[in-house]
C-alpha cells in the first residue's frame, strides 16, 4: 500500500498501465468531463468510470467509499444548483464532481505512490531549461504525501492522550497539541533534510 494507504494491489490492465499514462488520461478526462453541460453525457461518464472500477477489480463498495467525503459538499451544491439553475444543472455539477473524484481515486487505487512521483518527475524534466528542478519537485511531492498519514497519526495520539486524561472534547484542546506536534515533526524533518544538503 502507499503511504496514504489507498493503493490496492492487483493485476488488472489499469494496475499494469504506466503511471504517467494514467496521469495524462486523468488530465484529459478531467478536462473533457468539465466541458459536459447536459445530464445524460455526465451520467454516461459516471457509468464509464464505474465500469473502470470493475475492470480494476474494485468493488462498488470501494467506489462508494471514495464519494463518502463528498456527500455533504455534493448535497449542498445540488440544493444550491436546484434552487438557482434547476435540476439539470444540479445533476451536471454534482455528476461532474463525482466523476472527477472517482477518476482521481481510481488512479490512486491502482498506482503506487512512488510510481506517481516518478511520473511527475519525468514530466517536469523537459521544463529544466525554465529553471524547474524535477528532482526537487518529486521530493516536495513525496514529502507532502508522506506528511498526510503522519499528521493523521499525530491526531490519533492527541485524541488518545485526551481520552486517557478524561478531558472533554474541545476543538482548542485538540488543535493546539496537534499543531505543536506537527511543527515539531516539520522542524525535525527540516533538520534531517538540511543534514543531507537539501537546505534551500
Image: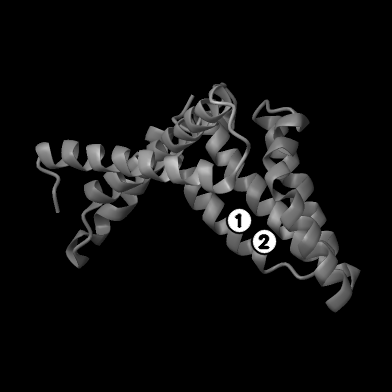
Would you say 59 lies left or right of 79 here? left
Distance of label 2 from label 1 (alpha carbons): 6 Å
Colour mapping used in the image: one colour
> Where does label 1 land, which residue?
29
Q: Where residue 87 sits: x, y (%)?
A: 90, 68
Label 1: which secondary element: helix
Would you say 102 lies left or right of 171 here? right
Residue 49: name its quadrant: top right
Q: Where residue 53 sits: x, y (%)?
A: 69, 35
Task: Please report the residue visible at 60 percent of the width from the left and 56 percent of the height from the top.
Answer: 29
Q: Where residue 198 sits: x, y (%)?
A: 14, 45
Q: Where residue 17 sits: x, y (%)?
A: 50, 35
Label 2: which secondary element: helix
Task: Please report the residue visible at 53 percent of the width from the left and 38 percent of the height from the top.
Answer: 108
> Where does label 2 land, which residue?
33
Tell me if residue 45 can be seen.
Answer: yes
Q: Are marks 2 and 1 in contact (CB under 8 Å)?
A: yes
Q: Quadrant of the C terminus?
A: bottom left
Q: Residues within 10 Å of mark 1 (few under 14, many from 20)?
A: some
Task: Please report the residue visible at 37 percent of the width from the left and 33 percent of the height from the top.
Answer: 114
Task: Please report the residue visible at 77 percent of the width from the left and 32 percent of the height from the top.
Answer: 60
Q: Residues within 10 Å of mark 2 (few under 14, many from 20)?
A: some
Amino acid at each position: 500500500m502507499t503511504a496514504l494507504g489507498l493503493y490496492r494491489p492487483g493485476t488488472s490492465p489499469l494496475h499494469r498501465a504506466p503511471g504517467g499514462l494514467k496521469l495524462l488520461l486523468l488530465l484529459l478526462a478531467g478536462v473533457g468531463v468539465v466541458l459536459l453541460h447536459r445530464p445524460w453525457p455526465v451520467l454516461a461518464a459516471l457509468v464509464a468510470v464505474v465500469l473502470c472500477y470493475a475492470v480494476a477489480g474494485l468493488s462498488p463498495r470501494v467506489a462508494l467509499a471514495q464519494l463518502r467525503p463528498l456527500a455533504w459538499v455534493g448535497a449542498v451544491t445540488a440544493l444550491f444548483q436546484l434552487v438557482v439553475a434547476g435540476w439539470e444543472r444540479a445533476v451536471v455539477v454534482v455528476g461532474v464532481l463525482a466523476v472527477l473524484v472517482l477518476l482521481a481515486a481510481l488512479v490512486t487505487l491502482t498506482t503506487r505512490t512512488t510510481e506517481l512521483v516518478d511520473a511527475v518527475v519525468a514530466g517536469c524534466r523537459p521544463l529544466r531549461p525554465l529553471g524547474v528542478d524535477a528532482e526537487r519537485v518529486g521530493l516536495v511531492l513525496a514529502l507532502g504525501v508522506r506528511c498526510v498519514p503522519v499528521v493523521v497519526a499525530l491526531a490519533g495520539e492527541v485524541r488518545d492522550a485526551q481520552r486517557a486524561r478524561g478531558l472533554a472534547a474541545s476543538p482548542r484542546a485538540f488543535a493546539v497539541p496537534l499543531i505543536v506536534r506537527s511543527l515539531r515533526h516539520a522542524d525535525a524533518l527540516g533538520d534531517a533534510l538540511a543534514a543531507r544538503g537539501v537546505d534551500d
